[in-house]
Image (cartoon, rainbow, N blue to C red):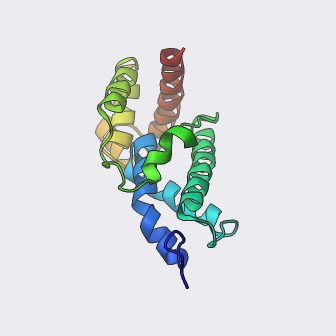
Amino acid sequence: MLDANTYPDWEAVYRDNVSRLYGLMYSRVGNRADAEDLTAEVFRAALKPLRLAASKGEVRSYLLVTARTVLASHWRRTLGQPVTMIDPDVDVEWLSDPPPEGNPTTESTERVGQILSALPDRYRQILELRFLHASSLKEAAEVMNVSVGNAKVLQHRALQMASSVAMEMDS
């Protein structure tokens, strides 16, 4: 006999939480490709330790904590420093019923605009192309008339500067 407060199998865990988790990741990284990769990484990381006998709330909490760890690792790889932007107490709404809208909030949109406006033109352009327009590195390099290697360097430096600007805004 199945409890209505638990998942019958891993497929049900995935189906019930994938769009919510994707929405959360997209709101934090701002581009589809990274959000998809990070969402998959969360499920891979949670697969072994997660118990199916756990309640839906416990499963969602575990996925949220796992998402925080995965996101911190992503930013550590990308920026060279951990930037954990998931607070399980605040962001639990992302995994609740019904899921929030997939669109970024007005506040986060304004914050991104403030950060981008504080960057030099080339840094702003590479980040807009890569993360707001979901361009590949090759596409962004072509638009900016630079080599792919140069685009990578620009993106790396732009992300570091954007991180510094965001930290200054928070202090």
- Which residue sits at x=34%, y=47%? 135
Q: Say if residue 86 shows up in the picture.
A: no
Would residue 72 appear left or right of 114 to someone viewing this image? right
- Which residue sits at x=61%, y=56%? 62
- Which residue sits at x=46%, y=53%? 95
- Quarter of the picture holding the N terminus: bottom right
Q: Position of residue 117 (x, y in %)?
A: 34, 20
Against 167, residue 75 (above or below) is below
Quadrant of residue 51 within the rendered picture: bottom right
Would residue 35 appear left or right of 69 to someone viewing this image? left
- Seen from the viewer's position, the closer of residues 23 and 82 is 23
- Which residue sits at x=64%, y=35%? 80
Quadrant of residue 129 within the rendered picture: top left
Q: Position of residue 37 (x, y in %)?
A: 49, 58
Would residue 80 appear left or right of 19 to someone viewing this image? right
Q: Position of residue 99 (x, y in %)?
A: 36, 53
Q: Position of residue 41 (x, y in %)?
A: 57, 60
- Seen from the viewer's position, the closer of residues 87 and 25 is 87
- Quarter of the picture holding the C terminus: top right
- Seen from the viewer's position, the closer of residues 2 and 132 is 2
Against 138, residue 165 (above or below) is above
- Seen from the viewer's position, the closer of residues 22 and 131 is 22
